[in-house]
Image: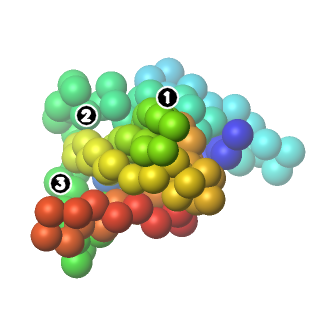
Amino acid sequence: MQSYTIGQAARLLGVSPDTARRWADAGRMVTHRDEGGRRLIDGKDLAAFSVELAKGGDEEEASYTSVRNAFPGIVTAVKLGDVAAQVEIQAGPHRLVSLLTREAVEELGLEVGVEATARVKSTSVHIDRT
């Protein structure tokens, strides 16, 4: 399972690292320390927190905008069918859903807790694994 530093989590949540540290200190985000003493957040925990945060409308939440229609975020759900798949990404306060092939999901290694970028062009959403 992929883990994220406080700085990486802050970027994915669209907040400052100080805000992410305060949330961790207050127990809102579950963290653990690596061998070097850095605080890390498991990808699945960060995905769940990002969904909860988007629903709650926290007052400290910074405004999050796309740059050139790219939405960096974290995968919060993957639904696999025989041929097609549905992937949800939480990018700050934005929830994006993309329908793509099961093969593409498997090739990109997309699963809950993985960092990914949704790119929007016209009516299509494309996902890049970062």
Q: Position of residue 29 (x, y in %)?
A: 49, 28
Q: Tell me the element at label 1.
A: loop
Q: Is residue 107 above or below residue 46?
A: below
Residue, disc 3: 63
Residue depicted at 46% across the width and 66% down the height: 128
Would residue 74 be visible to someone looking at this image? no
Q: Which residue is mark 1?
A: 29
Q: 117 or 52, which lies in front?
A: 117
Circle 2 — which element? helix
- Toward the viewer: 52 or 130? 130
Query: Which numbered tag is attached to residue 12?
Result: none
Which label number is shown at residue 54? 2
Gap between marks 2 and 1, in whole Å?
A: 14 Å
| Image quarter (top left, top right, bottom left or bottom right) of the C terminus | bottom right
Q: Residue at x 47, y 35 (%)?
A: 81
- Above or below residue 130? Residue 98 is above
In primary-sequence order, the first of circles 2 and 3 is 2
Crowding around mark 1 (Cα neighbors within 10 Å: few <14, some 14 to 19, many 20+) is many
Asked whether the residues under the numbered discs 2 and 3 touch, taking CB atoms below 8 Å apart as contact, a structural biologist would say no
Precedes in sequence: disc 3 or disc 1: 1
Relative horizontal placement of residue 109, taking residue 36 as reference (left or right): left
Q: Which one is nearer the viewer's eye here, 61 or 106?
A: 106
Q: Residue at x 51, y 37 (%)?
A: 82
Q: Position of residue 15 (x, y in %)?
A: 33, 50
Which image quarter: residue 122?
bottom left
Return the residue nearer the eye: 42 or 101: 101
Colour mapping: rainbow
Side (left or right) of 125 relative to 57? right
Callout 2 amino acid: Ala
